[in-house]
């Protein structure tokens, strides 16, 4: 919905948002008109086939998105493709609660139903491992608990990963 748009610095020269869900685009546009009225491009596009040339972005930001993509490995390959060498993947994602076995049990139990009602959101994704598997170098990463979030989505991973320079 673009809730994080106001956090991007005004110095950003080009800001592009992709949204695959036709029904979410009006929400994104409404938020953008408040927070980024003139410098945001919004494209209806899925993350598994980004409509951009290779190495065209300095950074990609993903906030609470990677849990719901259909093919996480394909999405990360696309992100890597569109990033310039040394470019940053900045992420904040909820993940499997590996450090809380009691919570992880519930995530596994609820996930089949949850995916159907929450836009394909996977509660038990191991996004950090997938980022490394995609060939990114983790520059900084923090595992945390998102206060006030539903206990099933409370475990979070926040970090910056870099596409290797040639």
Image (cartoon, rainbow, N blue to C red):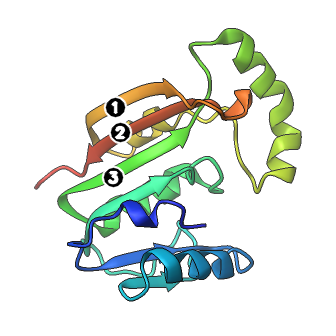
- Say which label, 2 or 1, has the lower sequence index: 1
Query: Circle 1 — which element?
Result: strand
- Residue 52 x, y percent position in the rendering: 37, 80
Q: Nearer the viewer, residue 82 or 91?
A: 91
Q: Are marks 2 and 1 in contact (CB under 8 Å)?
A: yes
Q: Which mark is residue 89?
A: 3
Q: How far separated are the C-alphas under marks 1 and 3?
A: 11 Å
Q: Nearer the viewer, residue 75 or 160?
A: 160
Query: Circle 2 — which element?
Result: strand
Q: Quadrant of the C terminus?
A: bottom left
43 is higher (above) or lower (below) than 6 = below
Q: Quadrant of residue 78?
A: bottom left
Mark 1, Cα crowd under 10 Å, few <14 / some 14-19 / many 20+, is some
Q: Are marks 1 and 3 in contact (CB under 8 Å)?
A: no
Q: Are marks 2 and 3 in contact (CB under 8 Å)?
A: no
164 is higher (above) or lower (below) than 127 = below
- Residue 24 x, y percent position in the rendering: 69, 74
Query: Circle 3 — which element?
Result: strand
Along the horizontal axis of the image, is 101 left or right of 82? right
- Residue 33 x, y percent position in the rendering: 51, 83
Q: Quadrant of residue 153?
A: top right
Q: Which mark is residue 159?
A: 2
Q: Nearer the viewer, residue 31 or 1?
A: 31
Along the horizontal axis of the image, is 4 left or right of 55? right
Mark 3, Cα crowd under 10 Å, few <14 / some 14-19 / many 20+, is many
Residue at 70%, 42% (x, y): give it.
122
Q: State the residue position of label 1.
A: 141
Q: Which mark is residue 131?
A: none
Residue at 54%, 61% (x, y): give it.
3
């Amino acid at each position: 919905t673009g809730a994080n748009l106001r956090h991007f610095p005004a110095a950003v020269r080009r800001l592009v948002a992709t949204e695959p869900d036709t029904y979410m685009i009006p929400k994104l546009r409404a938020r953008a008109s408040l927070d980024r009225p003139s410098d945001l491009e919004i494209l209806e596009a899925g993350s598994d086939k980004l409509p951009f040339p290779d190495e065209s972005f300095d950074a990609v930001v993903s906030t609470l998105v990677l849990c719901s993509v259909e093919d996480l490995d394909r999405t990360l390959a696309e992100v890597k493709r569109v990033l310039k060498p040394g470019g940053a993947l900045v992420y904040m994602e909820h993940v499997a609660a590996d450090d809380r076995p009691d919570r992880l049990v519930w995530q596994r139990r609820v996930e089949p139903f949850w995916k159907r009602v929450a836009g394909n959101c996977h509660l038990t994704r191991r996004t950090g491992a997938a980022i490394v598997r995609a060939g990114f170098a983790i520059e900084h990463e923090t595992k945390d608990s998102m206060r006030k979030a539903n206990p099933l989505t409370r475990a979070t991973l926040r970090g910056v990963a870099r596409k290797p320079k040639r």
